[in-house]
Amino acid sequence: MSAALDANVLLYASDASSEFHERALKTLHELAEGRELLYLFWPMLMAYLRISTHPSIFANPLSSEDAIANISQLTERANVRTPGEAEDFLQIFNESTADLTIRGNLVPDAHVVALMRQYDVKTIISHDRDFRKFDGIKVADPFK
């Protein structure tokens, strides 16, 4: 089984003040050390970089060097994949969102769902319930 990882797991793992911090660290360690393919799509990694370094959002923001180092440590793992959009991405995006009104905060989620479909990834590890709006996507919430 392969899975995609949502930015919120990365953020909780980097935020020692979060109630989800310990569970996020454990989940991240298990995924990084595991044998299953883990997809870290670039929109998620860039969201992590943006939020984890933002002093108005993150109580103890990371330096950009530390946040990038965290990303690098993950992307260098043998079981981690970081693919981007292929030529048919817009078609897949349109098919993935045909039954939904995509606007505002749902846009980044739809972007990730289209990437998941492009690479045949059916599960996302996330605490974000919006992913449940997309048919065929399974959300594995490590914080339940």
Image (cartoon, rainbow, N blue to C red):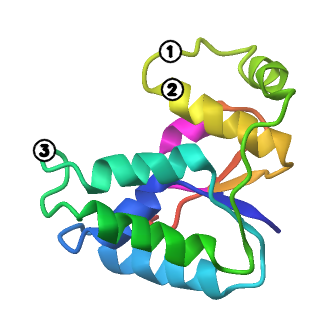
Residue at x-position 70% and y-position 85%: 34
- Give the position of the N terminus as an image quadrant: bottom right
Q: Dot 1: few (<14), some (14–19), or many (≥20) neighbours within 10 Å?
A: few
Residue 128: percent from the left, percent from the top? Answer: 47, 46
Q: Is there a contact, CB below 8 Å, between mark 1 and mark 2? A: yes
**Residue 21 position in % (x across, y down):** 31, 73
**Residue at disc 2, secondary structure:** helix
Crowding around mark 2 (Cα neighbors within 10 Å: few <14, some 14 to 19, many 20+) is: some
Label 3, on which residue?
56
Element carrying mark 3? loop
What residue does disc 1 label?
103
Which mark identifies residue 51? none
Amino acid at circle 2: Leu
Note whether residue 20 is visible. no
Q: Quadrant of residue 5?
A: bottom right
The answer to whether 10 is drawn above or below residue 73 in the figure is: above
Q: Residue furthest front?
A: 65
Q: Earlier in the sequence, mark 2 or mark 3?
A: 3
Tell me the magenta residue range.
125-132
| Residue under pointer 2 | 106
Give amino acid for label 3: Ser
